[in-house]
Image: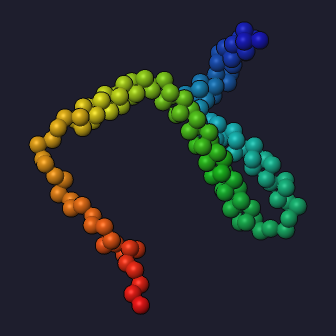
Amino acid sequence: MADFFNRFMDNLRNGPVGPVVRWAEDHPRLSMWIVLAIGMVAILLPESLKVNMEWYQRGVLVIATVLTAGACVWIISWEDEDEGEGEAAPEKSAKVEAKVEAKTASAAKPSAKKGTGKLPAKKGTGRLSKKKQS
């Protein structure tokens, strides 16, 4: 099946629609947006003819539909970015581990300061600890 698909794609690239196919391969998100928007508008227009609307109302619906298709493609592209981050995760995790080790090593060293500058809280001085006097 994969061999059939590869031959089909090679025939498309070398045929009369080759420039369009190569452009779609170079710009996958934009081509996805265009195809999805055409499909969504093709569904919208016949359905909107059943409702009594002005021409500009249909135009606004078409614009909103095209923008919605773009938002859908953008959201779908988040998954592609997440997969790309997964491949570079070992490098990032090594950097994070090095930072954590540096912090724990500095915390383990005794500090030259004796106090932290904060006074200890006195028992019974808080707002909630006051008793009602009768």
The mark total stands at 0
Q: Where is residue 87 in the image (x, y as percent from the top left)?
A: 48, 23
Q: Residue at x 53, y 33 (%)?
A: 82
Q: Residue at x 64, y 18 (%)?
A: 13
Q: Residue 90: where, in percent of width, then height?
A: 43, 23
Q: Which quadrant would residue 27 be assigned to in this image?
A: top right
Give x and y (percent) for residue 126. Answer: 34, 72
Q: Nearer the viewer, residue 41 or 124?
A: 124
The reply, left or right, for residue 86 in relation to residue 134 is right
Asked if residue 111 lies left or right of residue 28, the reply is left
Q: Residue furthest front?
A: 134
Up-down relation of residue 100 to residue 61 (above or below): above
Residue 49 image offset from top left, x and y in percent: 85, 59
Q: Is residue 116 above or below residue 81?
A: below
Q: In which quarter of the image is the N terminus?
A: top right
**Which image quarter is the C terminus in?**
bottom left
Q: From this viewpoint, which residue is outermost toward the right?
A: 50
Q: Does residue 11 appear anywhere in the picture?
A: no
